[in-house]
Image: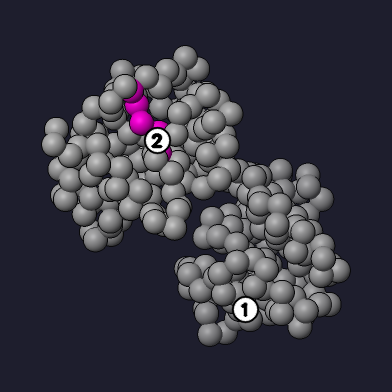
């Protein structure tokens, strides 16, 4: 069945805060309507929940931070526990952007802050240099397996603390809204679609997915994938959407 023209896209992420987002360029260039809606959101766990994980913040000399959410929820829990964050606490940040975000809570130049390149394994030299610290990994409930594997392999003293969790959003207001393309970026985004709409029928809706785990979740649930990124040709979701829509809308 030849696909009809694409006029509307729903991106399952927050609307970009920057004016020069490639999504806005795509909208102008291809004359399509793009809406943004988060299918999942982050919720903090309570200080009581953290205590039940047998975590006493006084026992740690270094904190491992893999996201901005980790920073927000560490300082929130510290406040709830009335824990005064010591000035000599070490902060190990997965990337420069995460380290910069720390300035929201601490005076940057007065703190011991260590920064990785990009991937978690890039932090290995820092852990090896400071191998006698007691590390707390501030994590979500759906942490990637590679993070504990790296830490276990280094034989350092570390503990996992779940400080926040990823929750499926309520999308009931979208029940009667139809989009030509739905774009997903995580397996839990697809799970949220089916939790909100158990009887979802794809019909002529095009499904766009980013990453192999999202692709697997979609196919496991019987969805037909029309648009996939990243690929050598289209490393970004916007690139994959543009390529597909340009071809489908041609001459229509």
In this rendering, does residue 38 appear at all?
Answer: no
Indicate left or right for 226 with 219 as reference. left
- Secondary structure under the numbered disc 1 in the rendered image: strand
Task: Please state which of residues 168 and 84 is positioned toward the viewer in this rendering.
Answer: 168
The residue drawn where x is 28% and y is 27% is: 3
**Is 104 on the left-hand or right-hand side of 71?**
left
Segment tinted magenta in the rendering = 204-208
Read off the residue under disc 1: 114
**Magenta residues, dominant SS class:** strand
The reply to whether callout 1 and callout 2 are in contact (CB within 8 Å) is no
Residue at the image position 28 percent from the left and 48 percent from the top: 242
Q: Viewed as shown, does residue 124 lie left or right of 207?
A: right
Q: Position of residue 132 (x, y in %)?
A: 83, 77
Question: Residue 19 appears at what percent x and percent y?
Answer: 23, 59
In the rendered view of the protein, which quadrant contains the C terminus? top left
Does 201 sit above or below residue 148?
above
Vertical arrangement, residue 10 with respect to residue 112, above or below: above
Which of the pair 140/205 is nearer the observer? 205
Q: Is residue 10 magenta?
A: no
Tell which circle, 1 or 2, labels the residue nearer the N-terminal end.
1
Q: Residue at x 60, y 70 (%)?
A: 93
Residue 37 is situated, as x and y percent measured from the top left of the image, at 36, 38
Q: Which residue is mark 2?
A: 226
Q: Is residue 119 above or below residue 79?
A: below
Tell me, yes or no, if residue 18 can be seen here.
Answer: yes
Residue 146 horizontal/vertical position (percent): 70, 57
Q: Quadrant of residue 76?
A: bottom right
Q: Is residue 46 left or right of residue 197?
A: right
Write the residue at 60% across / 62% down. 66
Q: Is residue 216 above or below residue 243?
A: above
For the residues marked 1 and 2, what is the alpha-carbon distance in whole angstroms? 42 Å
């Amino acid at each position: 069945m030849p696909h009809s023209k694409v006029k509307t896209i729903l991106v399952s992420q927050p609307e970009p805060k920057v004016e020069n987002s490639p999504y806005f360029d795509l909208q102008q260039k291809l004359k399509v309507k793009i809406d943004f809606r988060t299918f999942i959101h982050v919720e903090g766990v309570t200080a009581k929940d953290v205590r039940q994980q047998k975590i006493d913040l006084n026992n740690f000399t270094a904190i491992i931070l893999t996201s901005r959410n980790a920073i927000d929820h560490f300082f929130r829990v510290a406040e709830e526990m009335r824990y005064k964050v010591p000035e000599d606490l070490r902060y190990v940040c997965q990337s420069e952007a995460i380290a910069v975000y720390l300035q929201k809570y601490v005076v940057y130049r007065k703190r011991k802050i260590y920064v990785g390149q990009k991937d978690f394994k890039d932090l290995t030299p820092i852990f090896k240099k400071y191998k006698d610290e007691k590390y707390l990994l501030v994590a979500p409930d759906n942490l990637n397996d590679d993070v504990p594997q790296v830490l276990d392999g280094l034989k350092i003293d570390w503990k996992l603390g779940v400080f926040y969790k990823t929750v499926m959003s309520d999308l009931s207001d979208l029940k009667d809204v139809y989009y030509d393309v739905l774009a997903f970026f995580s397996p839990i985004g697809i799970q949220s679609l089916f939790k909100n709409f158990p009887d979802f029928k794809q019909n002529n809706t095009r499904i766009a997915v980013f990453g192999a785990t999202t692709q697997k979740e979609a196919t496991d649930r019987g969805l037909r994938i029309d648009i996939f990124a990243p690929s050598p040709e289209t490393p970004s979701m916007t690139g994959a959407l543009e390529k597909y829509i340009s071809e489908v809308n041609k001459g229509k």
